[in-house]
Structure formats: C-alpha cells, structure tokens
Image (cartoon, grey):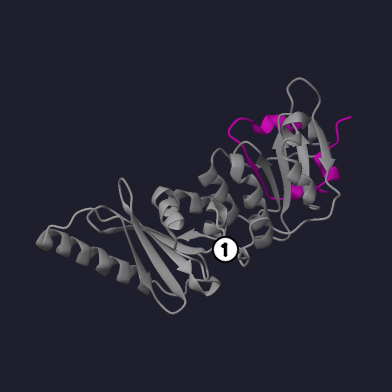
Amino acid sequence: MTLPLTKIAPSIGTLNSLFASSRFSDRSLEQVMGERELSPLLCRNKMELLEGLRGETIEVLLLDVALLDKQTQQFCWRTQNLYPGLKIILVGRDRQELASHNWVYEFPDISTLGLSSKSKSSVSTSIAAMSPDPNPRNSVSASNQYSGSSYMDVILGAAIFDLNGLPREYLITNEVKNMNWVQTIFQALGLRSLLMSSLRLEGFRHVTIYSKDHCALVVKQKTQYTALLINQTQSTPVTKAFIEWAQNFQPEQLKLNPLFHVT
C-alpha cells in the first residue's frame, strides 16, 4: 500500500523541502504526495544540496542514498546536529537498495522512501533508538589508532594554495575565530620557495607548524599545497600515516560537511 508523505511529515505541501537526487525527478514523488501538492527545490549534485540547506529555511530533506554514496551516514548525523528540526527522508529505488543502509534504522527521525519503477512507492518510518554518532568530533580512540574518518574529525579548517604559494580558497568551521594561521602558512610557503631557490633544495613534501591549541599540516599535492588546521587539544598525533592520508586528501570533501563553510 502506498503511504502519502503526509503520514511522515504532516502538511508537507506547506513546508519548504529539498529533493536531492541526480537520478529521480520530482514527478517520482507523485505516488506518495497524497492530496497535497509538493514542489521541492531540486538539487542535482552535492554542491546544490549544501547551497540549498544554507540558503533556505528547509523543513524536509528528501535525500537520495546514491547521491553521497559512502558519506550519507556521516552527512545525516551532522546535518541533524545542525538542524535539529529538519525531517530527513532517505530515498532509494526500492526496499532492497535501502536495506543495504541498515544504519538508517538507528535514526528515530529518519524515514525511508522507495521509488521503484517496477512497483508502487512505499514509505516506512524507523522506530529504533538512535545510537551514538559513529564519528563524533570530540571522541579520541583510547588506542590512538586513527583512520581517515577520525582524521577528518580533528580538522578545523583547510587552506588551498597554488604551486606558487598563492592562496586560492579557505574552508573553516565556526570554531576558527581568526585567519591568522593562513598568513603563517603563506609566509612559510614563501620561505620554502626562497630556501629551495637559494640552496637548491628538492623534495619538499610536508611541514608542520605548531601553536598552543592548534597545528597546521601543510602537504604538497599534485596541483596545489593544502594546509590542514588541526585541533591540538585532542592530542592528535601527526604521524606518518596521518601525513600520507593528508597528501591524498581532497579538500573538496569538506564542502559536503555542513560544519564547514567557504570563506
């Protein structure tokens, strides 16, 4: 039996909504609209999704599980933390696709919506209690064994410079109160260029700059230098593994994180 969306978001026709999907059209929702009209803002990619959340007072988010691929779970946790009143509905082709995302049933306020072309659309609401955030910002492993996701959790900002050492873009969280660290990185890259040209040094790969509460790890990548501002209050070890992870890290990923904004 097809359930109208009003069963999980009452009066949804009067609510501001986002439909984030690169494969479904808004007409796919007709079977579950009930008697109300629904004209969501369509977001066809990750950047449009973030811009929609920041630029509008959104009350309902219909999020295609395929849009963010493996990042959907973390995105939902952090979006729910930032917008506690936001109703999130995860959309998939059918129950089989949604079943591969078993973690959605840990969210009491997240529903699932199947939009199969072979059968009627259906809506189900999760009822299990919410478990702790699998990637909390303030958690530190007792064994100090860090992975890519936990490295992300201690990053407060990123600054991207071109290969000439000129700044291009900054992404920061609200915890960063000033941009003095970027000036320090800019000066360090200028000193690097001077030393390499005068002393004919080669092979620069990374540099770490420490302050009282933070440190900045600067790594050379193929087309740019990336500086990551790290929260030192969590005693994050800048190990060889961390440096190798940073060298392959794509700062564009931070644009998918609601905690970060471009400045």
Q: Position of residue 188 (x, y in %)?
A: 26, 67
194 displayed left or right of 207: left
Residue type of the residue flagged with mark 1: Asn
Q: Residue furthest left?
A: 198
215 sits to left or right of 81: left
Q: Secondary structure at mark 1?
A: loop
**What residue is shown at x 64% (from left), y 31% (from top)?**
25
Res 239 seen here:
yes
Q: Which residue is mark 1?
A: 144
Q: Quadrant of the C terminus?
A: bottom left
Say whether residue 77 is left or right of residue 121: left
User: Residue 227 lies in what quarter of the image?
Assistant: bottom left
Q: Which residues make up the magenta segment?
A: 1-30
Q: Would residue 55 be seen by someone viewing this image from the given angle?
A: no
Q: In percent of the image, x 77 and y 40: which residue is there? A: 112
The outermost residue toward the bottom is 212
Where in the figure is residue 176, as x and y percent of width and height? 48, 71
As for residue 211 lying within the magenta part, the answer is: no
* Of residues 177 and 86, the one drawn nearer to the viewer in this rendering: 177
